[in-house]
Image: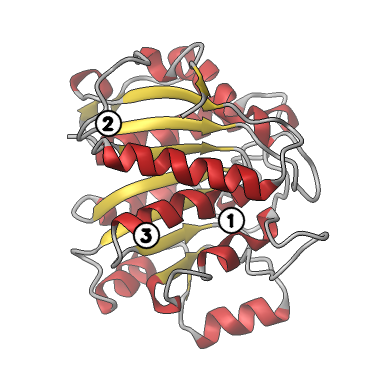
Amino acid sequence: MNRLPATPPFLGTRSDAPIACAPAILGVPYDKTASFRKGTREGPNAIRDVSDAGIETYSPTQNKDLEELTFSDLGNLTIEPEAAPETVVAALHAAVGELFAAKAIPIVLGGEHSISPGAIHAAFERHPDLAVIQFDAHADLRESYEGTPHSHACAMRRVLDFLPADRLLQVGIRSGTAGEFREMRDAERLIEAEFQAVDTAIQSRGWERVPIWITFDFDVFDPSELPGTGTPEAGGMTWREFEEIRPLFDALNIVGIDLVELSPQLDPSGISAVLAAKLLREWLLLMAN
């Protein structure tokens, strides 16, 4: 795995911390296919930069502290800014495969959403019964967009190239084509971003025991709370609504997650990066032993 060390690492973690049986953060600074406003390549380092001074290690809602847990920050994959998206997907696929082989729990920081199929495919190869839960403002079901089938607008279509369609839930989607919405509704996988809807969907599918990958696009949040994303959409989830949903995942078998589409330079206040770092803390605390 060709990577650059995190400087600084998330909340002061060591890049040489043991990764077996623990979450391992890996950044993918890439935004070549961003179709509106770029900048997500700065996301991984912005989350790290703000974490030490901007948030605490302790989560009052989970009553857990990162200082009591083991996790690592492996830095960023070495990615050329103009690399073809399919090569980035392949590189992340290989890297996440290495993490699974080392018995780590991958936490991928984007970067744009086009990277996610590589990580999810590696998880699917490791766990053939994998299910995926997508938090997002956008359906990302285009077959091709702006000349490439590997655009960030095609992320979930590429996942459905290998994942059975009934193993995907799409939460918080509020933007897409008529065809994308028709597909999601017909498949009964379009879920409102609220506790009861997500709980019912998980239980009705019997996913309480299956391995689950979370793909979390920061633009699922309302832009009034997280404006620093390339394609903001009004009407999104609030932090309070996320906190209401999060306990649903405490007892689930989360085998990995990607957090994508933070464009920190689009929010001069820095609030977006702080919220993203806080979100990463919450997922780390949920997934770490």
Please tell me whether mark 2 sits on a helix, a strand or a loop: loop
Mark 3: few/some/many CA within 10 Å (<14, 14-19, 20+): many
Distance between mark 2 and mark 3 Cα atoms: 33 Å
User: Which residue is depicted at the point 32% across and 21% down?
Assistant: 57
Question: On the image, numbered disc 3 is attached to which residue?
Answer: 124
Question: Residue 245, percent across and down?
Answer: 35, 55
Disc with the residue nearer the chain's start (1 vs 2)? 2
- For the residue pair 190 and 107, the one nearer the viewer reads as 107
Question: On the image, numbered disc 1 is attached to which residue?
Answer: 236
Indicate the amino acid at tag 2. Pro
Do tag 3 and tag 1 residues touch (Cβ < 8 Å)? Answer: no
Q: Nearer the viewer, mark 2 or mark 3?
A: 3
Disc with the residue nearer the chain's start (2 vs 3)? 2
Distance between mark 1 and mark 2 Cα atoms: 24 Å
User: Which residue is depicted at the point 76% across and 36% down?
Assistant: 82
Q: How is the image coloured?
A: secondary structure
- For the residue pair 130 and 269, the one nearer the viewer reads as 130
Indicate the amino acid at tag 1. Gly
Quadrant holding the C terminus: top left
Question: Residue 252, percent across and down?
Answer: 22, 56
User: Which residue is depicted at the point 48% across and 16% down?
Assistant: 5
Question: Residue 21, percent across and down?
Answer: 20, 35
Residue 60 numbered mark, or none: 2
